[in-house]
Structure formats: C-alpha cells, structure tokens
C-alpha cells in the first residue's frame, strides 16, 4: 500500500500534479470524515484515471450553523489511511487561509432557484457556499492537460444537479461522474452524519429508504405512485420529522405535478426525501 502525497498548499498540489504528469486525472472533493461511500468515489476514480487526487477541506461557507461547522468531524490521519487503502495518489488538505487566501470571497456564485428549494430552503446560503469552494477546487486540481474527471456522490442529488449546471454554465473543462449511493446492510444511505445517530435513531431512519422503495417499486411496475402513502409512512415513524418527500424532474428538480399521482408512471423521475431523525438531518434519493 502506497502512502499518498499530502499537499497542504496550492503550490504543493500544483507541483505534485506536475510531477505525476498524468494522461488522466480523477479528482474527488470531500470534507473528510471519510467512509465507504467516499471509498466508492475513490474506486470509480481509480478505475479510469492514471492519477487520483482528493481534497479534504471542511468548507466554512457551506455551513449556516457555526456549531455544526465547529463540530464537523476532523480526522485527517484516519482519512489519509482510508485514502491510502483506496489507492489515492495525492491528498490536498489545505487550511482555510490557503483556500480563502484573499479573505472570504466577495464575488460569489449564485445557485439561483435550483439552490433555493429543498435543502437550500432549510439551509439558506448552503449551496452558494458549496459552489464557491467546488469552483475553486476544480481549478486547483485541474491538470491542464490530458483527461480531467471529477467524481460526486448521487446521495447529494441537489448538490450534483447544481455542480452539473455550474460546469455547463461556466464551461469548466472537466467531465463529471456521478457515483451511486452506498447503503448499510439494512438500507441506510451512508453519510458522515450517521455517526451522530443513536442505535434507536438508526433503526428509525430506515423508514426513509423503505418509503423510497415503496414508490420506486410502483414506478418500476408503471403503476400510479400515490406519493402520499410514502409521506404517511415517514410521518408515522417514531423519532422522524419529515421535511419533504417529492418526485422531481432529475435535471431541474421541479416537482412532477402529475405523472406520479393517479396515472400510471412513465418516463423518468427522481425521488427526494429529507427528514430530521432525532437532531440529525438526513437526506436520501433514488432515480426512477
Ligand atoms: O459533498 C461534500 O462533501 C461537499 O459539499 C463538497 C462537494 C466537498 C464541497 O465542500
């Protein structure tokens, strides 16, 4: 097992990439606290690139709650170990001053209507802050030659939709790859936040996946979806406070007003669900 090179500054990252001189580079931005969900992103990147670069950076700008930011797990040593096991070549682990070297950015990206709904509605400013750092990181890891690919998990479906728009709208020279959700044996979507759940809450959280499966099964059989059954299931579950359960257009995230109620389901959609389980906010989704 090879130890990845650690780059703390943008100059070190640039030098490490230049030294590797890759014909293809796969980049996976993360906020650390790595788990096997991230592992699947690293694996996807490893499979089709000569060099794999990951970043570990907890981005203050995408937290709208200072306590949440302060408490976000930071465990670089363990992260580097997992990265090494996954065959990552370079870990970019900058301090905030390195990323926001000119102070917090004055000029920001606006995630627009796509960033205001669902997760954006309950976390104002989150997506603008997320785009601010992803825009920078995509520049910093750009090999400037050969193939450049970046990997994101499908679990953060709204994040992925926004990054897709940013890359298209601003002509970033990077190919985006999305990697399916990794679940626990019982079906809970893996997330760094799961560590904050008690055993009882973990059991309760399974209703998110069960309710998704109910609707996905109906979609697969081209039946009417009757989404209110899934909403009812989540609302009745103990310890669960449902925020939303919707079926949307996968690109625009606009709710599918019909084609999912009392008529047979055809075409494509994306089920999105978010709920608080105890004090922890969880999201899950599934394309149908
Ligand atoms: O999904 C995440 O971990 C973060 O939002 C990202 C993309 C690394 C930006 O900070």
Image (spheres, rainbow, N blue to C red):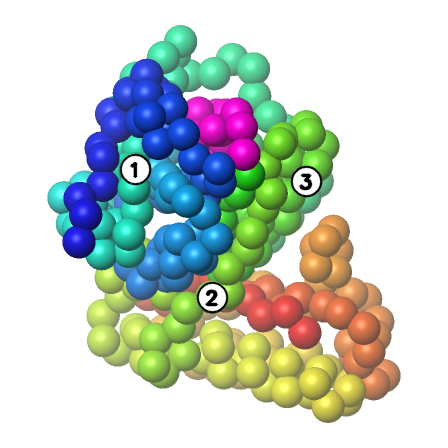
Residue 83, percent from left and from top: 26, 50
Using the image, determine if residue 276 lies above or below residue 228.
Answer: above
Range of magenta residues: 134-146
Q: Nearer the viewer, mark 2 or mark 1?
A: 1
Residue at 44% across, 51% down? 45
Q: Which residue is mark 1?
A: 90
Q: Is mark 1 within 8 Å of ligand 1?
A: no
Q: Is residue 60 magenta?
A: no
N-terminal label among 2 and 3: 3
Question: Which residue sits at x=38%, y=24%?
Answer: 18
* Residue 281: quadrant of the picture: bottom left
Q: Write down the residue under mark 3.
A: 165
Residue 155 visible: yes
Residue 54 placement (x, y as % from top left) = 35, 41
Q: Residue at x 82, y 78 (%)?
A: 266
In the image, residue 133 sits, relative to residue 286, either above or below, namely above
Decide: few, some or many residues near mark 3? Use Cα within 10 Å; few <14, some 14-19, many ≥20: some
């Amino acid at each position: 097992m090879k130890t990845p090179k650690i780059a703390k500054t943008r100059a070190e990252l640039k030098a490490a990439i230049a030294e590797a001189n890759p014909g293809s580079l796969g980049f996976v931005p993360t906020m650390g606290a790595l788990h096997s969900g991230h592992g699947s992103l690293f694996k996807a990147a490893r499979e089709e690139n000569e060099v794999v670069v990951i970043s570990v950076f907890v981005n203050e700008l995408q937290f709208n709650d200072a306590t949440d930011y302060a408490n976000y797990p930071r465990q670089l040593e363990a992260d580097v170990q997992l990265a090494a096991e996954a065959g990552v070549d370079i870990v970019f682990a900058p301090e905030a001053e390195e990323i926001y070297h000119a102070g917090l950015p004055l000029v920001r990206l606006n995630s627009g209507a796509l960033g205001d709904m669902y997760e954006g509605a309950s976390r104002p400013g989150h997506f603008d802050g997320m785009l601010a750092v992803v825009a920078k990181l995509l520049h910093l890891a750009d090999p400037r030659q050969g193939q450049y690919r970046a990997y994101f998990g499908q679990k953060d479906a709204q994040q992925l939709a926004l990054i897709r728009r940013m890359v298209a709208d601003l002509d970033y020279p990077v190919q985006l790859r999305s990697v399916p959700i990794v679940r626990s044996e019982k079906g809970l979507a893996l997330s760094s936040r799961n560590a904050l759940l008690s055993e009882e809450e973990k059991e309760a959280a399974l209703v998110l996946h069960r309710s998704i499966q109910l609707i996905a099964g109906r979609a697969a059989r081209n039946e009417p979806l009757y989404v209110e059954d899934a909403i009812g299931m989540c609302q009745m579950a103990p310890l669960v406070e449902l925020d939303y359960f919707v079926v949307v257009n996968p690109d625009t995230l606009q709710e599918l007003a019909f084609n999912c109620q009392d008529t047979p389901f055809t075409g494509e959609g994306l089920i999105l669900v978010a709920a608080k389980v105890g004090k922890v906010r969880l999201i899950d989704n599934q394309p149908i």
